[in-house]
Amino acid sequence: MSTADTPSVSIVVPVYNGMPYLPAALDSALDQDYANLEIVVIDNASCDGTTKYLESVRNPRVRVVYRESTQPAADNWSEAIAHAQGDFVKLMCADDLLAPGAITSQVALLTMHPEAGLVANRRSVMNGAGQVIKRHHGLDGLRGEVKGIETIRACLHAGTNLLGEPVCVLFRTAVIQQAMPWEGRWPYMTDLATYAKALLSESVVCDATSLATFRISSTSWSSALLKQQPKQFAGWRAEVTKDARLRWSALDQIRSNANLAARTAARRIYFLREQRAARNR
């Protein structure tokens, strides 16, 4: 089958001050074996050497959009999706990594499930020192093609985003573009709150293979927002459960609150350990 006969894929990379991790992230995208691929980077007026590095990249598959002023992260993510020209699109951040063959695998799954709007895979989790601390993380029992409503309910019950960060997900471009903009009211919940807008009418294919690596550290965006996470999850939950299709009950709320508290405590313990380890490196 020729490139012209295969679906096209856009990997979009919204970045602000992405050094020193951006080169490795871009390499992992360029190393994909999927031929019909474009990579679009939105440089959000970086000031740390990111712009200089991007100016040195010479690859016909890479297209860079340079912004003259910095915009909020959710707006930069939305602009990145708007620039996607492929049939499918994946958003990855500057410190994420894609496993070899990730795009080929996810395109195959969406091709096998034409009614699904997105596919999600498990991922590895890496700390700030580049050490993998979790393998095959995410989904928590979600497997195969799952109705979007049931996926949202599973995430609400778990008190977390079971589908993972955008690097774990491949969307049909039309589906995610209709769900734009990325939700900015709850920064910690930007990914799941936006997925949910699509999942109210779409199903998701859940595959247990780990196809990406997400970096988490004591200086990451997630760490900075950790204290706000329970409040932001609750805010998103209060809004999304207004939809009668979710069939949300008082018992569901109790279960969600318990799991949210447990996961928040576990994250706090991890970040305290990571901060101590970072000071000793």
Image (cartoon, helix red, strand yellow):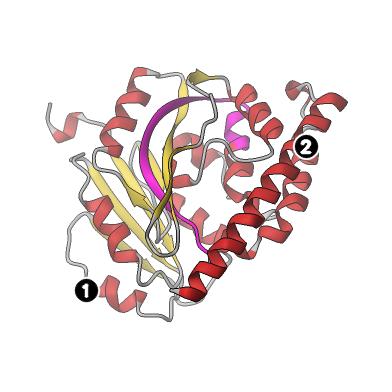
* Residue in the image at 57% along x and 62% along y: 273
Q: Amino acid at mark 2?
A: Ala
Rendered view: 269 above or below 202: below
User: Would you say the residues marked 2 and 1 are in contact, meaning their CB atoms lie under 8 Å apart?
Assistant: no
Q: Quadrant of the C terminus?
A: bottom left
Hey, which residue is sitting farthest front in the picture?
Answer: 280
Residue found at x 32% / y 58%: 25
Q: Is residue 249 visible?
A: no
The answer to which quarter of the image holds residue 51 is bottom left
User: What is the x, y in percent for residue 17?
Assistant: 44, 73
Q: Residues within 10 Å of mark 2 (few under 14, many from 20)?
A: few
Which amino acid is tagged 1? Answer: Ser
* x and y, in percent, of residue 166 in the image: 47, 46
Rendered residue at 44%/72% (across/down): 67
Is 205 included in the stretch rendered in magenta?
Answer: yes
Q: Residue at x 78, y 47 (%)?
A: 235
**Direction left: furthest residue:** 2
Disc assigned to residue 254: none
Which residue, given by chain and number where applicable, does mark 2 sit on? 258
Q: Is residue 107 above or below residue 111?
A: below
Say if 67 sits above or below 138 in the image.
Answer: below
Q: Is residue 77 left or right of residue 5?
A: right
Is 252 left or right of 41, judged from the image as shown?
Answer: right
Part of the protein shown in magenta? 196-217
Identify residue for label 1: 56
Tell me where residue 271 sits by quadrant. Answer: bottom right
Using the numbered discs, state the Cα–Cα distance from disc 2 to disc 1 in whole angstroms.
Answer: 49 Å
Image location of residue 62, percent across then percent down: 25, 58
In front of the other: 184 or 125:
125
- 80 falls in the magenta region: no
